[in-house]
Amino acid sequence: MDGWIIAMMLGASTLLGAFGLWGLLWGIRSGQFDDHQKFLDGAQFDSEEALNDAVTMERKKAKVLKEKKEREVGYVPPD
């Protein structure tokens, strides 16, 4: 291939990448990805059973993490 073809391909890909980066940054700055009502609507329309399940899962997760920390301490000989 000639050098001008490679230079043209590099220029075009750099330009497309710059447009993509600009579009992503514009979306972040303008709040396109923000969803302020997501958690409020999720809790509002959940049933009581679903909320109780979520609490139970959080408690199980905390228990497992606590047991994991206790195991990481290592062997402690009995007195």
Image (cartoon, rainbow, N blue to C red):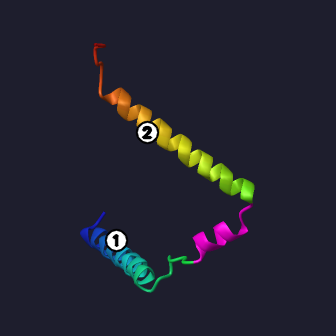
Amino acid type, label 2? Leu
Q: Of circles 2 and 1, which is in front?
A: 2
Question: What is the x, y in percent for residue 11?
Answer: 30, 76
Tell me the CA gap for discs 2 and 1. 52 Å
Identify the residue at horizontal 40%, vertical 33% (top origin): 68
Q: Main secondary structure of the magenta part?
A: helix
Question: What is the x, y in percent for residue 55?
Answer: 60, 51
Identify the residue at horizontal 42%, vertical 77% (top origin): 24
Magenta-span inclusion, residue 43: yes
* Circles 2, 1 touching at the beta carbon (< 8 Å): no
Q: Is residue 42 above or below residue 76?
A: below
Tell me the element at label 2: helix
Query: Mark 1 Cα within 10 Å, few/some/many (few <14, many 20+)?
Result: few
Residue 65's disc number: 2
Identify the residue at horizontal 28%, vertical 14% (top origin): 77
Residue 52's disc number: none
Question: What is the x, y in percent for residue 19?
Answer: 39, 80
Amino acid type, label 1? Met
Most extreme residue toward the left is 3
Residue 9's disc number: 1
Query: Mark 2 Cα within 10 Å, few/some/many (few <14, many 20+)?
Result: few
Most extreme residue toward the bottom is 30
The residue range painted magenta reads 37-47
Question: What is the x, y in percent for residue 2?
Answer: 28, 67
Front-most of 11 and 40?
40
Picture quadrant where residue 7 is located: bottom left
Q: Is residue 2 above or below residue 77?
A: below
Front-most of 71 and 16?
71
